[in-house]
Amino acid sequence: MDVGCLALEVLLSITITTMSKSTSKSFFIIGADHTGITVSNLERSLGFWRDLLGFELSHTAHQKGELAREITGVAGAELKLAVLKAPGGHKIELLEYLAPPDRTKHADLRPCDVGSLHVAVTVNDLNAVLQRITASGWKTAGKPQTLQSGPNAGKRVVYVRDPDGTTIEFMQTPDQSG
């Protein structure tokens, strides 16, 4: 190896090492704890998540005053919340804001709109879930589709929108299919 190539290799090694040290984080993410969903009616949403889908109620709370303001950054915030546990450990936090009075009561975001989000849950029988959802008066956004490519190839998926417009994606893995 000639001196020029060796010098370049050493310089690149020093540069890469320096860059990796200067961009290293002093923290790391341990995991995802929960997904929070703002709802207009906590009891109605519990009827869906707990009673229809079978999520387990972990706890409820009522927050107001300085605590609510400091957590949310919303002056005058007052809210009721319920935390539900999914099999596998992920939690869904349903939040019904009682105040402030000037809050938006309904946001008509579509899945393609900035700020929209969805929660995806895996089920063992998509058809059975859809039958229960239909019987309860909820509607799917479209018809279930089987993904043809990518890391989720073979999964059957469909979006469901709750009365507040929140999108929930139901996914059934190929090994759970019919």
Image (cartoon, rainbow, N blue to C red):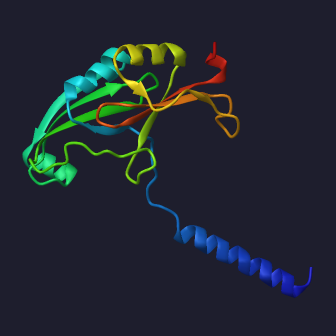
Q: Is residue 68 above or below residue 41?
A: below
Question: Which of the pair 141/87 is nearer the observer?
Answer: 141
Residue 56 appears in the picture as rendered: no
| 117 left or right of 7 in image | left
The quadrant in which the C terminus is found is: top right
Q: Position of residue 139 (x, y in %)?
A: 40, 25
| 53 left or right of 107 in image | right
**Residue that appears at 15% across and 38% down:** 79
Q: Is residue 69 above or below residue 178?
A: below
| 164 left or right of 19 in image | left
Question: Which of the pair 20/154 is nearer the observer?
Answer: 154
Residue extending furthest bottom? Answer: 4
**Residue that appears at 71% across and 74% down:** 13
| 65 left or right of 146 in image | left
The quadrant in which the N terminus is found is: bottom right
**Residue that appears at 38% across and 38% down:** 33
